[in-house]
Image: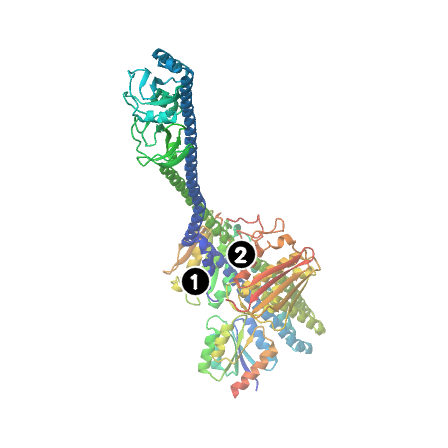
Amino acid sequence: MALRVLFVDDEEELVSTVTERLDLRGIDATGAVSGEEALILIEQKPFDVVVLDVRMPGLGGLNVIKRIKQSHPELEVILLSGHGAKEDVETGLRLGAFDYLQKPVDLENIIAILHRAAARGRA
Amino acid sequence: MPASPSIDPLDPTEVEAARPYLAGPGAARLRRTVVLATAAVSIVPLVIISFLYYDQYERSLRTETVEGVSRQVTNNKRALEFFLTERRSALSFIVRDRSFTELCDVERLSRLMKHMNDTFALGSFADLGLIDADGKQLCYTGPYDLKGRDYHDQEWFYRVSRRGVFISDAFLGYRHSPHFAIATRQERGSGGYYILRATINAEVLAEQILAAGLTPDDDVFLVNKDGVLQSPSRRYGAVLKNVPIRIPHATGDVHVVEQEDEQRRPVVIGCAQVGDSPFVLVYIKPHVRPQSAGLSLPRLLLFLLVSIAFILGVILWGSRQFVASLRAHNLKRAELMHKVEYANKLATIGRLAAGVAHEINNPLAIINEKAGLLRDIVDLEGEFPRRDKVLGIVESIMGSVGRCRKVTHRLLGFARHMDVGSETIAVEELLREVVSFLGKEAEYRNVTITVEAEPGVPNVESDRGQLQQVFLNILNNAEAAVRDGGRIDIRVRSAGERRVAVSIADDGIGIPKENLDRIFEPFFTTREGSGTGLGLSITYGMVQKLGGEITVESEAGKGTCFTVILPVRRG
Amino acid sequence: MTAAALNENRLREQDLLYFGRVLAGQCHELVNALNIAHELCGLHEDILPRAREGHTGAMEKLGSLARRIQTQVARCHAIVRVLSRFAHSVDEPRAACDAREILERAVFLAARQSRLRQAELQAVLPEGDVRFVDCNPFRLQQAIHAGIEQFLEGIPEGRHIGVSLTLDLAGALVTLESADLLPCKDVAAGRLAEVTALVQATGGEVRETPEGGGRLVFFIPHGRRDATSPASDTLAPGAGGGS
């Protein structure tokens, strides 16, 4: 079964490009441009992994992690961080994120981590 | 975006170190030191010298007085002795020259006395008498009626009979003015003798001889061995009074002593025995005090007081000006340093930002062109034959994107550390970062820059931004110093237990030996008309603040090497 | 140190921090755009084989991707342009500043923060003949930016903030207001102090403050030289004018 991934970042272009690329590689990728949208989508569809930008306007990445872990504890979260968001990443990891990736992300890297996270989630 | 960090511009330890010249207590302490030191150095010698001078003056006055008295006594003694000798000789001559018979003739005797008075200066023979061996006055000329008088039981008669010549003490006798007598004995052919006796007016003696050249405060008189006045004394009164002070023991030599008179006033007393007479010449001079010369001790003290007050006034005023101006100067300097340090920093990042913008435009333009080309290819060509070309274009775009990213990250790396902090820093990595800040300029000029680190150099706990600024400053200097095609070698190594040394060596124009000591001085610059000369001094200050040290070695024409030593742990 | 000197020091430190902050923020934006361009290229590479194989729409897709790359590049260009102007704004302590440009720049540079607070930032540019204000461009921009930050921090998310600037012969009047006229929270008091310090350093005055739920209005007059400015003591002698 294809991996179901939710990609969340406030840069719309980035979201659409990455999800399209993931699609081309056989991953069922959906995009969201805000934390709120992400939470709505999580309720609507099942996902295996969520990739989450740590710094977003509105409901920031950390709050989303908290909510996800409350409502869907088995859902693994991977953090995406830009330059210098070290503390946020640490907090996110403490809140239960599986791992983190620094932007810019090599697609092969993302895919590898996605599979690892999904494997953990299923276990 | 996080809220702006709290701004605390002044490092408290820095303020503390500058406190002596900034705030009240420190400035007051400095002023106190200056005032005390200057006052001590100027007032103490003044007081010492003043008192020394006073003392010296007193001494020299005293010496002068003593010598003066000695002189006076000598002169007077001589004059007196001469006078007496003259008179004595006259009598001797008469008594030898004239016969006894002649001398018995009163008219002759009178004539003789008159001649003597006419001849001798000062006259002063009051009477003349001839006395036989029994003491009877045989002949007499003079103001009184003394013929037939009998002196045989008088001491003077006894004396002259024995001695042959005699000078008497002063006496009033039948008269009421002081006289003294000179008597001389003459042998008779028949075995007896007779005596010729003259009475001398003692007052004349005193007035004419002794009083000559006497200064108003002085006194000169004659006494006998019992301290009875033989001549009138200004101090002690008329003849035959007792002199109340103790006369020092007199000899034929002049004897001068300093002692107190009967009223406990200090005087100088000179005395001498007048030869062949019962007289002692006494000269009394009051001690000349500096007062009389206008210099009294109270006056001296007043002078000192006024001088000291004046000196202190000037010192206090001067020191206040001095400390105030020192303080103002230090304040200005601190402010200037701060200002310039700030401008330095801003100039650096401004330049960097502008440089980045400049550098990024090229790759951006490339991306744009290529992407445009891509569109053209894709839009215009129906089929898709040139896959390789398209791929090539895309790869080139990605390459340019990568370049842009690098440049941007570099700028970000610098911009993010504008505030003071402390973190663990890998020195080699930081140096490479800073080298990249130099950007394209070094590359265009073919300047080779190498960065090498010894293995195992520890990381350093420090402020990244400051460290970047320090090395950037040094590197900028190095870059300016080298020619095109030159090189700059950067080495990182351990320097002892807890220290790391970074050396930046260039093969540029170098620094002449005479300037080497001064290059870290503020405002020192060898570049004509460019720069404030503050760059290296700021760098020096920054290194100090980071707990390290910076040294330089250089040879004109060969190159320069700056070495920065940093502690692994701060504080 | 004298109070005046301390104040000047503070302002200078603030200048540096502001500069760094803005620079860092814009660098992030640049990197974001570049990352996207990178991804687009990657996607392009992914699509390429399909286009070759003649899949429908693949060619159009490639073209569209190329366009999208250009859009990101244009975005970078805009940022770099503004950054460059910004970097040069510290060169002179006083200049005839194009007020429009400064306002636009301040709003542009604050866009990132506004986006994070989901606020809508709108600039109302001055009209009329008078376009220039003779003042310290860096400080003016900093003041406007700090004012914007005050509103961003002081009002709830998702609101509208308007910044307008009017010019007359006396100087520039800057007005910031949130459309809802919400009261500004105390947490923004620090920002107000920053704005006040900056405005006063240029010889101007703050005329209205937004605590009670009003506007932030400050005035910067023409022609006063700011002695504490960034470049009032440049490294090259003879340039600028130090006090």
The image's colour scheme reads: rainbow
B290 and C46: which one is in front? B290
Q: Which image quarter: residue B309?
A: top left
- Is residue C78 found left or right of B144 in the rendered image? right
Q: Residue at x 41, y 26 (%)?
A: B76
Q: Is residue B338 visible?
A: yes
Q: Is residue C57 left or right of residue B336?
A: right
Percent from the top left, x then y, of residue B511? 65, 55
Instruction: Tell me which amino acid carries mark 2.
Output: Glu
Q: Secondary structure at mark 2?
A: helix
| Label 1 secondary element | helix
Circle 1 sits on which residue? C151
* In-front residue for pair B104/B31: B104
Left or right of B32 on screen, residue B489: right
Q: Chain of mark 1?
A: C
Q: Residue furthest bottom?
A: A123
Residue B250, given in percent of the width and then of the height, sits at 39, 33
Question: Can residue B357 be seen in this snapshot?
Answer: no
Residue B90 sits above or below residue A30 on the image: above
| Residue furthest out toward the top | B107
Task: State the image coordinates of residue C108 (x, y, percent, origin top left).
Answer: 52, 61
For the residue pair B509 and B165, the one nearer the viewer reads as: B165
To which residue does mark 2 refer? B341
Label 1: few (<14), some (14–19) or many (≥20) C-alpha neighbours in 10 Å: many
Contact between labelled residues 1 and 2, with CB atoms less than 8 Å apart: no
Which residue is painted at 60% across and 76% down in the image?
A: A106
What distance separates the C-alpha of mark 2 from that of mark 1?
33 Å
Q: Chain of mark 2?
A: B
